[in-house]
Amino acid sequence: MKTIYFIIAISGMILTTGVTSCTKHKGDFEENIPSAVISISSPVANAIYHKEDSIHIDAVAISSATIHGYDISIKKANDTTTLFFNHIHDHNDTLLISQRWRNTIIDAADFEARITLYLDHDGHTSTKRVKFKVQ
């Protein structure tokens, strides 16, 4: 009988230790995920362009930590085909983004310019999109 009480007491201590060791305590390490704000000044939302126009993609990206590069792409809205893509490997907490794409599309369509920032080497990103039209 004493053996059963001993086993129950030991099990209770192990359970109590396991529960308290898994809870957060003041001063515990927390993962610090960087954040960023992307402000796109061009193209403006729903801007209209024509064939052979140069489309300027201008933006400012500000992050709480060093940014590890960014991608710029242009696609038709609701389509996976990439018409323009550029990867820029740049490191800073503030980036001035400026790219140009010459529109060679014949068909009128809705498009999307996308900027994706690489916030760290752990896969955290921040993305901003703006839609525009080609007529």
Image (cartoon, grey):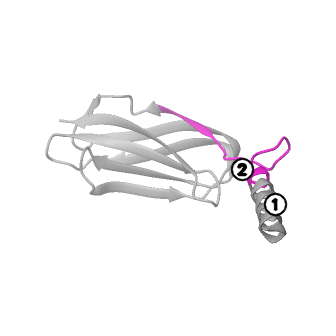
Q: Label 2 vs label 1: CA separation?
A: 36 Å
20 magenta-colored: yes
Query: Circle 2 — which element?
Result: loop
Instruction: Quickly name the residue at label 1.
Output: 9
Q: Where does the image place residue 135, in percent across and percent down from the top left? A: 17, 35
Q: Nearer the viewer, residue 57 or 129?
A: 129
Q: Which SS type dominates the magenta stretch?
A: loop
Image location of residue 95, percent across then percent down: 62, 43
Rendered position, 83 above or below 115: below
- Say which of marks 2 and 1 sits in front: 1
Q: Is residue 46 left or right of residue 32?
A: left
The mark found on residue 31 in the picture is: 2
- At which x and y percent is residue 23? 74, 47
Q: At 15% from the left edge and 40% from the top edge, which residue is drawn?
A: 108
Question: Could you say which is closer to the camera, residue 54 or residue 20?
Answer: 20
Q: What residue type is labelled 1?
A: Ala
Q: How crowded is mark 1: few (under 14 residues within 10 Å), some or many (20 or more)?
A: few
Q: In which quarter of the image is residue 45?
A: top left
Q: In which quarter of the image is residue 110?
A: top left
SS label for mark 1: helix
